[in-house]
Image: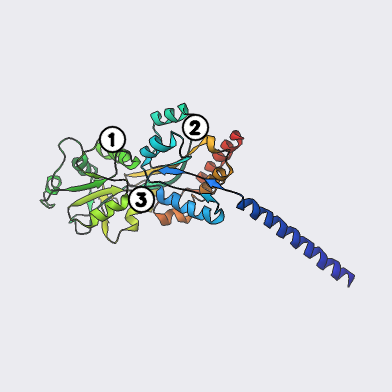
Amino acid sequence: MKKTFLFVSLMLMAAALLFAGGSQEAAGDAELSGSIKIAGSSTVYPVTIAMAEEFSALHPAVEIPIQSTGSGGGFKNFFIPGSTVINNASRAIKEEELEAARANGIKPLEFQVGIDAVTVVVNKDFPADEISIEQLAHIWRPENPARKWSDVDPSWPDTEIELYGPTSASGTFDFFTEEVVGEGGASRSDYQGTEQDNTIVQAVSGSTSAMGYFGMAYYLENKDIIKALKVNGVMPSIESAKAGDYVLSRPLFIYVADNALDRPEVVEFVRFYLERTGDEMIKEIGYVPMTKADVEQNLAKFEEAVKAAR
């Protein structure tokens, strides 16, 4: 009887200690507060939105406002001036952006968070299913570009091409012009530019003469109303981007300001984000997740930066 009572007492004490520890941990979590301001790439935007929603469910006192401004617009107007602590980017930071950030006392920390396949889209009723890089260059080049679809291929419609795409503030614009036209920033100017990729979706779905391009996630979300073209014979997909077979595949990044790593809410959010870049969620959004080794490497790099900031 005494042994039974002693056993029960010990079990109750252990449970009480466990509960107390859990309560303290929960209380510690609840104490996280503040605002983590983020801007940048429209391509990375849905990933960061998903991460922020999951993090906010655990830490409701932390506000995470996110703006879709384009990679370059985010760097120039928000991250470098110091009004945001994270910049979403669909391209690597440029040397002049890096120098400007450092001149303002900010060391940008780069972390790859996935792989994208820039997708060229047309109307569902467009009569072709594929296009070459050379044909895309003919359409998008700044000098003597194709005006009609038949200028690109005589079997295509004899109608004016309607073009939609990201603005020059976009990392997708930089990447596309570099890979397609052969020079970053070289593009015809008579197209409708926007940082709202869903605007491109609506325009292309509504006109048989329209073409646009953006990150693959926006195509996968709307593939019932628009058509993706094969480029050089390869369809954009998670598999072709992962294998490197699709010519317009590219890495996606977030950049973190090192001088924000003295803020617990920033440290916890970035750690939370990086830990999940290998999750199925990234694939569900429309990008290639990071490998386990890449996730571990990113986390090791981040923890080293946190340690240096203390």
- Marks 3 and 2: in contact by CB < 8 Å? no
Percent across and percent down for residue 71 are 38, 40
In the rendered structure, which amino acid carries the disc numbered 2?
A: Lys
Task: Specify the farthest residue to the bottom.
Answer: 1
Helix, strand or loop at mark 1: loop
| Coloring applied to the structure | rainbow
Task: Please tell me whether mark 2 sits on a helix, a strand or a loop.
Answer: loop
Mark 2 or 3: in front is: 2
Looking at the image, residue 271 sits to the left or right of residue 226; the answer is right
Which residue is depicted at the point 47% across and 28% down?
102
Q: Indicate the quadrant containing the N terminus: top left, top right, bottom left or bottom right.
A: bottom right
Q: Nearer the viewer, residue 39 or 209?
A: 39
Q: Quadrant of the C terminus?
A: top right
Q: In this orientation, does residue 283 appear?
A: yes
Q: Earlier in the sequence, mark 2 or mark 3?
A: 2
Contact between marks 1 and 3 (CB within 8 A): the answer is no
Report whether 237 appears left or right of 265: left
Identify the residue under disc 2. Answer: 107
- Counting residues from the start of the chain, the first of labels 2 and 1 encountered is 2
- Secondary structure, mark 3, is helix
Question: Which residue is labeled 1 in the image?
Answer: 185
Q: Tag on residue 24? A: none
Question: Spatial distance from mark 2 to mark 1, Cα to Cα?
Answer: 26 Å
Q: Which x, y percent locates residue 115?
A: 40, 46
Cα distance in 3D space between marks 1 and 3: 26 Å
Say which residue appears at 38% left-offset and 46% top-offset: 68
Q: Amino acid at mark 3?
A: Ser
Can you give x and y, in whole percent of width and height, for residue 289 in the image? 45, 50
Which label is found at residue 240?
3
Tell me if mark 2 has few (under 14), some (14-19) or many (20+) residues whose alpha carbon lies within 10 angstroms of its own: some
Quadrant hosting residue 129: bottom left
